Image: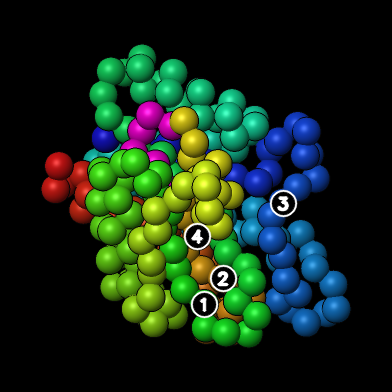
Amino acid sequence: MLIFLDRQHTGQIKRINHTGAGRDLDGDGKIGFHEMEAFFTPFYLLGAEKRLRELGHKTIPISDGSYAERHQRCNKYQNEIGRECIYIAAHLNAGAAGKTGYGSMFYDERSSRGRDLAKQISIKMEAHLPELQNDCRVIAASRDNWTKNAFYTIRGVQAYAICAEPAFIDSPAHRPLFCASGMERIGIALAEGIHAFVEAL
């Protein structure tokens, strides 16, 4: 299986400075680049890529272009190789407001295989990450409700697609994940979930 691993937020020419959500994690009174979403996601994507390759899967990392351009590129690659693929839009959540927070895997509401993929990833996230306190949610994304932002990160992708929001950057419970080793653990869990889905096909 070929898996596209997309580091979203950054890499958009029309939003060149955009790096996603951020929080003052080190308590110095300002939000540095190292405390922004787009500078954490590559750590978990690298962990996922390494584990996926160990498990025998092929990967293509992506990090530039508008979301629509990235989706079109992945569709082109999928059509060239003539087989099913998986697409992960990598994000981290914000807005826990001091609460525990949760993990979430969004899928296109029209895709039953997308739902199955989200379930497998969520199972592995809960198994590997005690910080989530057994709460990684499988959420159908639609253009018509509060999930529309997640929907647009995967809209039009032919592959089985997930918008991954595995942890909250402002959740005290998730704080141990916001370091290189914590992100790597997220990536490994993501890879194990993808692998379980592929094995079940």
> Which residue is denoted by mark 1 in the rendering?
101
Q: Amino acid at mark 2?
A: Phe
Point out the residue furthest to the front here: 144
What distance separates the C-alpha of mark 1 from that of mark 2? 6 Å
Q: Earlier in the sequence, mark 4 or mark 1?
A: 1
Q: Which residues are magenta?
A: 157-162
> Which residue is denoted by mark 2 in the rendering?
168
Say which of marks 3 and 4 sits in front.
Answer: 4
What distance separates the C-alpha of mark 1 from that of mark 3? 21 Å
Estimate how packed mark 2 is, as few (under 14), some (14 to 19) or many (20 or more) residues with alpha carbons within 10 Å. many
Q: Amino acid at mark 3?
A: Thr
Residue at left offset 76%, top offset 59%: 33
Q: Amino acid at mark 4?
A: Glu
Q: Is residue 117 left or right of residue 132?
A: left
What distance separates the C-alpha of mark 2 from that of mark 3? 15 Å
- Residue 81, above or below 32: above
* SS at mark 4 in the image: strand
What distance separates the C-alpha of mark 3 from that of mark 4? 15 Å
Residue at left offset 26%, top offset 24%: 83
Task: Pick the quarter of the image with the C terminus.
Answer: top left
Q: Is disc 1 in contact with disc 2, using a CB cutoff of under 8 Å?
A: yes
Residue at left offset 40%, top offset 58%: 139
Residue at left offset 36%, top offset 14%: 80
> Which residue is denoted by mark 4 in the rendering?
165
Relative depth, front residue between 75 and 183: 75
Colouring chosen for the image of the structure: rainbow
Q: Earlier in the sequence, mark 1 or mark 3?
A: 3
